[in-house]
Image (tube, grey):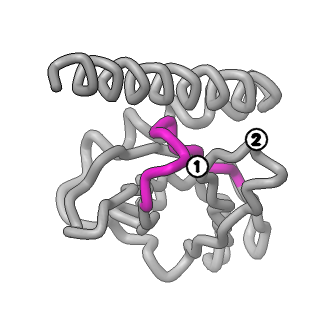
Amino acid sequence: MSSAAASALASASAAASSASAAASAFEASVSAETLRANEAAAAELAKVSGGGNAGADVSLRGKPRAETGGLLAVIVSITNRTDKKASYAVQVDFTDAAGKVVESRIVGGEDLAPGRLVQPLAISRKPADLNLTPRIAKAQRY
């Protein structure tokens, strides 16, 4: 019995490591500028309480797993609906069937002209066999 448990634990650990490695490889294809923008977005969201001021400017759309090496990834569509240049920070939470947040990812878009759309990816690092649902937790215009 303990041998089966150890084998299951090793299998789960290997799956988590594989998912994390796949996420790292996939994210490595994203430009350094996008990563820098995401870091700026994280710093901005740290100042926000509640859901933020830009929920109406943001939406999510799933990306086919065939295009992401099996990973759960969502396209975060951010549109500057104001009449001034603005930057955006978005937190995407990945929740399990019970609604518990399993993982959060932060993306952003900087200095968007009025009407401009950007579509960064929020990529889960959790194993692909988990049934997670992405949702917008915070969206802040600054």
| Res 44 → quadrant | top left
Q: Secondary structure at mark 1?
A: strand
Q: Residues within 10 Å of mark 2 (few under 14, many from 20)?
A: some
Q: Is residue 1 left or right of residue 40?
A: left
| Circle 2: residue type | Gly
Q: Is residue 130 above or below residue 116?
A: above
| Circle 1: residue type | Ala
Q: Split into 4 quadrants, where in the image is the N terminus?
A: top left
Residue 32 percent location from the top left of the image: 74, 22
Reply yes or no: does residue 87 show up in magenta. no
Q: Which residues are magenta?
A: 120-131
Q: Residues within 10 Å of mark 1 (few under 14, many from 20)?
A: many
Disc nearest the viewer among 1 and 2? 2
Q: Residue at x 77, y 67 (%)?
A: 117
Which of 9 and 70 lies nearest the eye of the viewer? 9
Residue 57 percent location from the top left of the image: 56, 76
| Marked residue nearer the N-terminal end (1 or 2) | 2
* Residue that numbered label 2 is attached to: 69
Q: Residue at x 74, y 31 (%)?
A: 26
Residue 48 percent location from the top left of the image: 25, 52
Residue 10 percent location from the top left of the image: 37, 18
* Residue that numbered label 1 is attached to: 122
Q: Are marks 1 and 2 in contact (CB under 8 Å)?
A: no
- Residues under labels 1 and 2: Cα distance? 14 Å
Which of 35 and 67 lies nearest the eye of the viewer? 67
Q: Is residue 1 above or below residue 3?
A: below
Q: Residue at x 50, y 33 (%)?
A: 40
| Res 94 → quadrant | bottom left
Q: Is residue 3 left or right of residue 83?
A: left
Q: Is residue 4 above or below residue 82?
A: above
